[in-house]
Amino acid sequence: MTLKVIAYARNGHTDKFGIPRQSREESPILTRIVFEPEYAVKEALRGIEGYSHLWILWGFSEGERLKVRGERGEWSPTVRPPRLGGNTRMGVFATRSPFRPNPIGLSSVRLIGIEDGDLIVSGADVLDGTPIYDIKPYLSFSDSHPEAINGFAEEHKGYRLRVTGYGDSVPESVWRDIEYILSQDPRPGYQDDPEREYKLDYAGYTVTFCVNDQTVVVKKIEKMLK
């Protein structure tokens, strides 16, 4: 089976570092879904405004893909989730790791609207330029399971850090997004050095920050060099 790219995601995430680990309902970050000419047909979106949320199926295009080792196409049945410190191995099908037999991602997003034939959504956990393979309506009566058990990810549900620093050097909408990204703690789960400085690129800006206890301290925000 050959998958066709029907659209590409466009947003401020120009680097993998800082992309939310999961799609989030409360995320203020907007993503524009720009359809390829073959699929930029108005009729294909007829009725989509009747849904508040959508599923998008996409490809891990820029991340490291599963390495096929040898001619027999061997693959690794376990991966090391960053949230578990990067040392504990879990079964690949018990995680959302990009190191999969097929590098396909699935995200639940909120539909904000349609603009010039593009879909505007919030909550997408994808890189700018991510290829999208399909879009389907989210149905609350079949897709929502409030009683679901979240495995080792349970302890990180609702996890947020306090963000301090100054965002007056960037547009308000960009600072809103940056503040949200930092509050989700983009650091690898195995790094917890309060003196270490991290750099995050978003929407044309480089943010330098460190994390002390449960607080993110923004050191500086600079315009990225072209």
Image: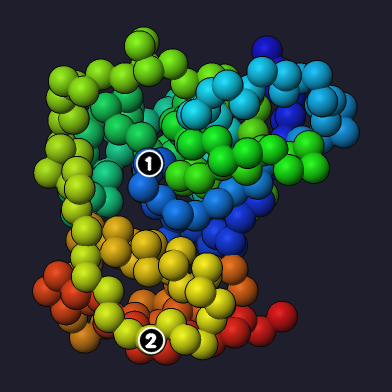
In the rendered view, would you say 55 is above or below 83?
above
Q: Type of residue at label 1?
A: Glu
Most foreground residue, 55 or 117: 117
In the rendered view, would you say 30 is above or below 169?
above
Q: Check disc 2 and report its element: helix, strand or loop.
A: loop
Left or right, residue 33 beside residue 219: right
Most foreground residue, 14 or 175: 175
Which quarter of the figure has residue 44?
top right
Q: Which residue is mark 1?
A: 25
The residue that appears at 71% across and 80% down in the rendered structure is 226
Q: Type of residue at label 2?
A: Tyr
Q: Which residue is mark 2?
A: 166
x and y, in percent, of residue 111 in the image: 55, 35
- Which of the two labelled residues, at mark 1 and mark 2, occupies the earlier sequence position? 1
In the rendered view, would you say 45 is above or below 25?
above
Q: CA distance from mark 1 to mark 2?
A: 26 Å
The residue that appears at 27% across and 44% down in the rendered structure is 80
The residue that appears at 46% across and 64% down in the rendered structure is 177
Specify whether residue 119 is in view.
yes
Q: Check disc 1 and report its element: helix, strand or loop.
A: loop
**Image mark count:** 2
Most foreground residue, 197 or 9: 9
Residue lying furthest right: 37
